[in-house]
Amino acid sequence: MNTMTTEPNETSETVENTPPLVAETTDTSAADALENLAQSPSQQQQSTTVAAKRKKAFSKRTVEDLAIQPHRAADCFIIPGDASEDGQRYAGTPLDDLRQNLPWGDVHETILTGLLASAEMIKHPDGHGMIAVNKGAPISVYAMGSDESIEFVVENGRQRTRVARVLNERLSFVASWCAQHTEWTTLQARRKHLLSEAGTHEWITEDFVRLVFGTSEFGTAGDRSWIVVKKDKTTEPHTTTFTPVEFWLTLSVAGFNPSLTDNTTLLNMIARQDNRVETPRSIRAANIARLMSADGNGNKLTSDAIGKMTGVSSDTVQNDVRFLQLIPEVQSAIENDRVSQTVVLSGAGRKAGCLFTKVDSTLVPLAEDQQRKIWAALESEYPADADGNLPKIFGTKATNLGLKIQKAVLDGKEWGDAKVEVQESDGNSDATQVAPSSQTPSQTTQANGNPSQTTAQGPSQTAETPSAKPSKGKGTKIDYARYYEHLDRAIDSAADPTESGLTDSIIVERSETRAALTAAKAVLAFIGGDRSALKDVPPVLRDALLAATADAEPVVAPVVPANVKEQSDDLLVTALMNAAQVKSDFAPSECAIGDKLSDGSEPSDDAAHLARNVLAKYKADFAAQSDVGVFYDYVQASLS
């Protein structure tokens, strides 16, 4: 048995034996697992036994035969919902996750190169010729039917199945090309002239040709060519045939005859997807909507149940449902990264974006005609540059602008007219705005030369002054040092709100506890003379403390050198990008400051320290917000 070992690829793993044919989840589906959560141990054991009997549709001999020979031609696998006749039979069922026709992209090409590089050539099951397999990357399937008629319906591995079929088509093309150009009698000549076809077939690259022909010049010595050349000298003239080595897939059974009326079959399948080829937001949202709708048994799944199985928060699930309530052009804009979800849908604290409104604490989409007017006006504020590049609509500025446009449209005004009014209003507001003063009200009146207007105003003189002041108490003594130490310990031992698997209510509760402890500690530090501590105090409390201190001075943040701030911002953006490359739906807790700037140079110690502190603050501010889009927008807005 010869192994093609040109170069390692992340699609393969070194394995000693063929992977298990039957996955560990064979006997218990997601439906069984969710049902078992509410059952006693004895009930769980009974239901598991029933489930096993229900799913056992094949004899032991059939399963053993599959284990002996788990390799199948790529065309033997059914992709639910694709254009084939078999695929259409499963279209719309819980086995159809809508990912069968994802656009072909660079990730598909990378997978194809990986299959070429890591494939192992073995004898064909019929004993004639060779096939290529990749035992380290089995395709998870549902075995449907019975011993007499068995179908392999793909559960996880749709894109790899598509790639395997394309690979075989390309290998057939190369074999046909060789047969048409018998004048090229050596591998080197074939390689050289096949590369000339790259103009009409962009997938013909040097790497592809090197892997297909397996020459010692371009690959590892001893590599076997994927094109088998046979010369028949018994005929006159002599004939030469070129046959491609077909790539077969290795299967792993995820279950037998799953229910086609139970949406938890779909949920179980989605939860186990590797998602190497990212699922578009529109498809993800459509699947969420299906899961939350009544299935063939009349059952519906909640956003909490879906979130727990798929590893996201209930808020993220709800936002996927709301995504479908946006007009198509806005859905497309979000998927193409033209606009942030925060601007048009919802942001931190479940605030309504400009295409939604809140009714009794529930986010409700505006009518389609209103959405189109608002979106057209918002887009017009972000035109393309001279090169035709469209800027991204994101951040606080875009969010506020969207809400102003929303108000104008809901008031029945054209944005062109309302825009002038908004600009004039903003201009007047800027002209009359007074900077916050560090003086007390009495100091301000004296400075203005109005001694008759004192701060000793009674309840009748202003509606903002409370009619009664809080009691001074009975002079209870407080050991501030011990109080401060206690708060320190409480903060260190406070439960982490970013821990995975928490419900929204627990996340909010833990975040509020941490915020309260931090604010209390900052107040004590302020009383002790540390003016900078007020930066960690909520604005309302900060203003109250400043007003109560006659000699208070504005809290000025330390000046950060420009180059340090620039490097710190660079590190923050890089941390976001790196986290997004690993997983598109990353959480703030998964961001980490690296040791290199975007240009590869090393940052200063001060810049790295500042970046880590700033990121820690962002994480704390967004501990209760699991939507990565909101976190990304918040960081970007803060940097700008």
Image (cartoon, grey):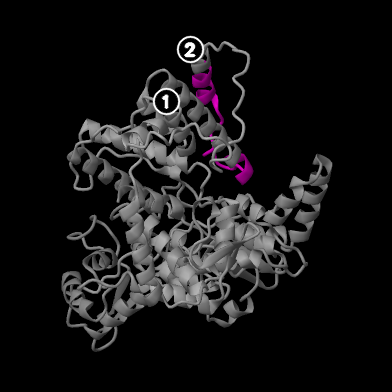
Examine the image and state in which quarter residue 470 appears: top right
Residue at 25% from the left image edge and 85% from the top image edge: 180
Q: Is residue 486 above or below residue 390?
A: above
- Dot 1 amino acid type: Thr
Residue at 61% from the left image edge and 76% from the top image edge: 91
594 and 213: which one is in front? 594
Residue 69: x, y in percent? 55, 61
Mark pair 2, 1: CA separation? 21 Å
Q: Is residue 539 above or below residue 404?
A: above
- Dot 2 amino acid type: Ala
Identify residue for label 1.
549
Query: Is 500 inside the magenta-drawn segment?
Result: yes
- Which numbered dot is residue 244? none
Identify residue for label 2.
481
Query: Is 635 inside the magenta-drawn segment?
Result: no
Q: Is residue 583 visible?
A: yes
Residue 551: x, y in percent? 36, 24
Q: Is residue 86 above or below residue 450?
A: below
- How many C-alpha atoms fall within 10 Å of the one at disc 2: few (<14), some, or many (≥20)? few
Residue 106: x, y in percent? 34, 66
Q: Is residue 164 visible?
A: no
Given the current orientation, which residue lies at the most extreme bottom position?
Answer: 236
Examine the image and state in which quarter residue 322 appears: bottom right
69 and 297: which one is in front? 297
Q: Which residues are magenta?
A: 486-507
Q: Earlier in the sequence, mark 2 or mark 1?
A: 2
- Circle 2 sits in a helix, a strand or a loop, which is it? helix
Residue at 38% from the left image edge and 76% from the top image edge: 417
Q: Nearer the viewer, mark 2 or mark 1?
A: 1
Residue 580: x, y in percent? 39, 52
